Image: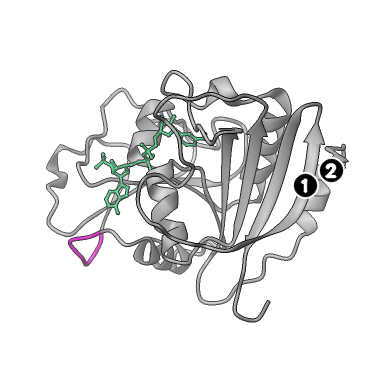
């Protein structure tokens, strides 16, 4: 049986080895139903629980940067992590359309402006103030380029909070080191299914690192299988 999710969780997770060279350690945090649905009514909150929210905050406290796809930032009304009381992590958003509505909560608040990564040549003139535009050298945003830039800026731990589209690209590129998957005890159905989106198949192999539970909710932590494992 999985061990109960217990009080020293924050310390346990903090003490895990995440040493990495040349690029940041990438962890991802997702909540999903037993059938892999990632949202209810277009947002993840309906699948979450108190313990999942606790894990969410603990993981943010480990991160230098919280990285999300723009669709997640828009759907979940992202704030700056500092303002959500989580951590000192800086927010980074990946976008192609540069559709960042001017009422996005993350456009103002404490701490440094969020980074917005976009492909070379995209028209950034409509970007609202309150972000730091980061134009990449390529017409396609590659997760490896985003991570390389974050590493240059000093980030050593990057927490990807989705969504599935962006996470799939990261996993598919072999850049995901650790996945926290909260399994909500529900068969959700619907079309918002698939923690790594509809790309692939990726075939990214994982090994189970830790399995905890809180009542009916399971918390599985996986790590990517490396050649030297
Ligand atoms: N269950 C969970 O834990 C969880 C976590 C996060 C999100 N969610 C849910 O997932 C849904 C959103 O996820 P999603 O998979 O649809 O989208 P997503 O990954 O959050 O964002 C996709 C968007 O990110 C930008 N993007 C991604 N890769 C890019 C690239 N290589 N180059 C340029 N731009 C890129 C594009 O933004 P533009 O459209 O601006 O071009 C794209 O439309 C929401 O319903 C959200 O509530 C659930």
Whether 65 is drawn above or below 52: the answer is below
Residue 85 screen position, x and y as percent: 62, 32
- Secondary structure under the numbered disc 1 in the rendered image: strand
Residue 88 screen position, x and y as percent: 58, 45
Q: Which residues are magenta?
A: 136-140
Instruction: Specify whether residue 114 is in view.
Output: no
- Rendering quarter of residue 97: top left
Q: Mark 2 and mark 1 in contact? Answer it, CB < 8 Å.
A: yes
From the viewer's perspective, tell me whether residue 53 is left or right of residue 72. Answer: right
Residue 83 screen position, x and y as percent: 54, 31
Q: Which mark is residue 2?
A: 2
Q: Quadrant of the N terminus?
A: top right
Examine the structure image and report whether residue 206 is included in the region drawn in magenta. no
Q: Residue at 51% across / 62% down in the picture?
A: 204
- Secondary structure under the numbered disc 2 in the rendered image: loop
Q: Residue at 35% across / 66% down in the picture?
A: 145
Residue 151 screen position, x and y as percent: 47, 66
Instruction: Please give the residue where the numbered disc 1 appears in the rendered image.
Output: 211
> Mark 1 Cα within 10 Å, few/some/many (few <14, many 20+)?
some
Q: Residue at 82% across / 49% down in the picture?
A: 11
């Amino acid at each position: 049986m999985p061990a109960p999710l217990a009080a020293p969780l924050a310390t346990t997770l903090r003490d895990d080895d995440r040493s990495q060279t040349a690029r940041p350690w990438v962890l991802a945090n997702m909540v999903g139903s037993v059938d892999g649905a990632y949202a209810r009514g277009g947002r993840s909150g309906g699948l979450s629980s108190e313990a999942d929210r606790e894990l969410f905050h603990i993981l943010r406290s480990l991160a230098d940067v919280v990285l999300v796809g723009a669709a997640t930032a828009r759907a979940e009304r992202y704030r700056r992590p500092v303002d959500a009381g989580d951590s000192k992590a800086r927010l980074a958003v990946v976008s192609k359309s540069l559709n960042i509505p001017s009422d996005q909560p993350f456009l103002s608040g404490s701490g440094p402006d969020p980074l917005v990564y976009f492909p070379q040549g995209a028209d950034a003139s409509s970007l609202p103030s309150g972000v730091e535009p980061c134009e990449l050298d390529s017409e396609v945003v590659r997760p490896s380029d985003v991570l390389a830039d974050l590493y240059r800026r000093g980030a050593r731990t990057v927490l990807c909070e989705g969504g599935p589209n962006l996470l799939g690209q990261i996993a598919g590129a072999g850049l995901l080191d650790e996945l926290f998957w909260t399994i909500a005890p529900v068969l959700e159905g619907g079309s918002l299914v698939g923690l790594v989106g509809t790309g692939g198949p990726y075939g990214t192999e994982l090994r189970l690192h830790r399995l905890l539970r809180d009542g009916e909710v399971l918390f599985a932590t996986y790590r990517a299988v490396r050649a030297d494992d």
